């Protein structure tokens, strides 16, 4: 019987984050390729009106450059993001096995939220 891919769920909570917050997602202990198959974000408090979630392959990447693997348009904070990707998004972790997530709140330093990324390896 063929086995399906092994899924890795990376979850976390943001408390009192601002517009420039970048969260490290640890997936491995070295550089490896994963595919992003799902993403969920729910903002639970704060003063921001919108957010623009982004995922990058290196710390401190520039928005819209080659290291950015996922981005959403500006979304009202009252609208949760819950996505299962029809076409998985390949991502290569850095030398430490990390990817980097920015919730992208438009203002404030008091924003809270919960995130979940679903990755697969070996597709």
Image: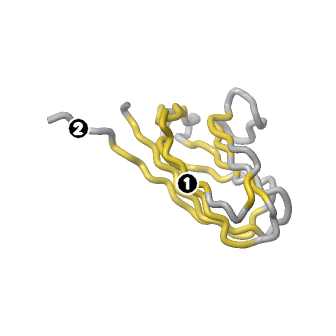
Give the color scheme: rainbow, by chain, secondary structure or one colour.
secondary structure
Toward the viewer: 79 or 52? 79
Of all residues shown, which one is farthest toward the left? Answer: 1
* Camera-nearest label, 2 or 1: 1
Residue 3's disc is 2
Instruction: Say which quadrant the N terminus sits in.
Output: top left
Q: Is residue 12 left or right of residue 32?
A: right
- The residue carrying mark 1 is 82
Residue 33's disc is none
- How far separated are the C-alphas under marks 2 and 1? 26 Å
Give the x, y percent position of residue 76.
74, 59
Q: Is residue 24 left or right of residue 119?
A: right
Instruction: Examine the rendered structure and indicate whether residue 121 appears above or below residue 22.
Output: above
Q: Secondary structure at mark 1?
A: strand
Q: Is residue 48 left or right of residue 37?
A: right
Question: Would residue 21 be visible to someone looking at this image?
Answer: no
Which mark sits nearer the N-terminus, 2 or 1? 2
Residue plotted at (73% across, 44% down): 73
Residue plotted at (68% across, 34% down): 68
Neighbor class of circle 2 (other Cα within 10 Å; few <14, some 14-19, many 20+) is: few
Give the x, y percent position of residue 72.
69, 44
């Amino acid at each position: 019987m063929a086995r399906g891919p092994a899924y890795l769920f990376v979850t976390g909570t943001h408390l009192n984050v601002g517009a420039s917050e970048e969260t490290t997602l640890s997936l491995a202990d070295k550089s490896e390729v994963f595919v992003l198959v799902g993403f969920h974000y729910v903002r639970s408090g704060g003063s921001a009106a919108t957010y623009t979630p982004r995922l990058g392959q290196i710390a401190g990447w520039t928005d819209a450059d080659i290291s950015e693997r996922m981005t959403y348009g500006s979304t009202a904070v009252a609208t949760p993001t819950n996505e299962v990707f029809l076409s998985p998004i390949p991502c290569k972790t850095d030398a430490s096995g990390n990817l980097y997530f920015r919730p992208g709140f438009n203002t404030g330093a008091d924003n809270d939220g919960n995130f979940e990324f679903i990755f697969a390896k070996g597709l």
